[in-house]
Amino acid sequence: MMKKSVFYEAMHDKENQITFFEGNSNPTPPHFHRCIEILYLLDGSVKSSVDDETFLATKDDILFVRRCAVHALEPDRDFRDYVLIVKTQFSDDFASMLEKETLPALLSDKEFNRKLLPIFQEMARKETQDSFLLTKGYIDLLFGKLLSHYERRKIIATPNLSTVVAALNYIDEQYQQPITLDSIASHFGYTKYYFSRLFNQYIGDNLNNYINMIRINNVLSKAKKDETANLCDLVFACGFDSMATFYRNFSKYYSVSPAQYLKTMYRQNTR
C-alpha cells in the first residue's frame, strides 16, 4: 500500500527541456516521476530513501534514482548538490539498458565519482543547457561512464505503483485512440472505481485530465517538428474528439492561446 505522503511530481514528466540545477538543504518529501534523477553531492550529507532502501550519503557520493522510484531526501544544513533530471528525449541511447535493471541507488566510489564532477560542472553552464546536442552529449558520456563502472541489479517493482506506471506507459502508446476509464480499467483487470481511486492516489489528478495533458504535449511536440503542420489536423491525430475539447484543456496548462504559444516556440527555434 502506498504511503499517503507520496506524490507524483508531474511537472518533470510534462517538461521537455533539461532540468539541471544546484540544490541546497531543503528537504524533499517522498515522491516519484518517470524521469531518471541523478544527484552529485558537493558538500554536507543527506539521509536518503529510494524505494525501501535508506542510507546516508556524503560528499562525492552520487545518488541514482531510477524511473518511477519513490524517493525522499533529508539533508543537513551544509548540504549542496548538483541535480540532473533526465527527460525521455535525452535517454533514448541507454533507456533500453535500464528497463529491467537499474544502478544501485547509492554510488559510493568517491574516487571514481570525482572524475565525473567536470561533466556535472559542464552541464551547469548556461551554454550547455541552451544546446540540446551538448546536453545530450554530456548525458550520454555520464551514463556511459556510470554503466561501465557500476554493477546493475534487477528492478523489484512495487505492486500498486507498477500498475500505475504500466497505465502511464499504456497511455503514452495509445493516446491517439479513444481511452475511457472503463476501457483502461478493464485492460488492467480492475473495476473502474478501484482503478480511478488508485490513479488519483498516485497521480493527483483524474484520468481524463492526464490523458488530455499527454495529448497536448504530443500536439506541441509534433508542431515543433513540422512548422507547416495544420493545428487542427494535429489535434485530431493526437486523439482529441473536437477543437473545443483541445482549447478547453490547453487553457488549463497555458496562459496564452495555442497560436500564441506556437508562434513563440517557432521564434525560439530560429534563434
Image: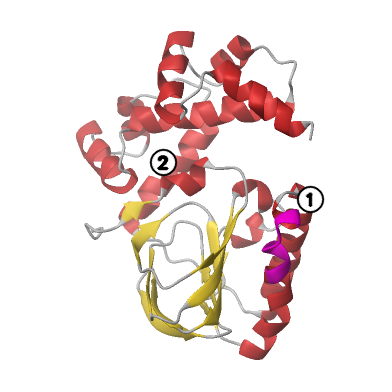
Quick check: is 126 in the magenta stretch? yes
Q: Is residue 104 above or below residue 185?
A: below
Q: Where does the magenta region start and end?
A: 121-127
Where residue 112 sits in the image (x, y, percent)? 68, 86
Q: Quadrant of residue 31?
A: bottom left
Spatial CA span between label 2 and label 1 = 31 Å
Q: Residue at x 54, y 42 (%)?
A: 15
Name the quarter where the N terminus is drawn.
bottom left
The residue singled out by tag 2 in the image is: 167
Q: Residue at x 50, y 76 (%)?
A: 80
Where residue 116 sits in the image (x, y, percent)? 70, 77
Where residue 261 sits in the image (x, y, percent)? 58, 24
Few, some or many C-alpha atoms within 10 Å of disc 1 (few <14, some 14-19, many ≥20)? few
Label 2 residue SS:
helix
Q: Residue at x 62, y 79 (%)?
A: 151
Where residue 152 sits in the image (x, y, percent)? 59, 74
Name the kind of residue labelled 2 in the image. Ala
Quick check: is 216 in the magenta stretch? no
The residue singled out by tag 1 in the image is: 133
In this orientation, which residue lies closer to the viewer: 271 or 118?
271
Q: Is residue 85 visible?
A: yes
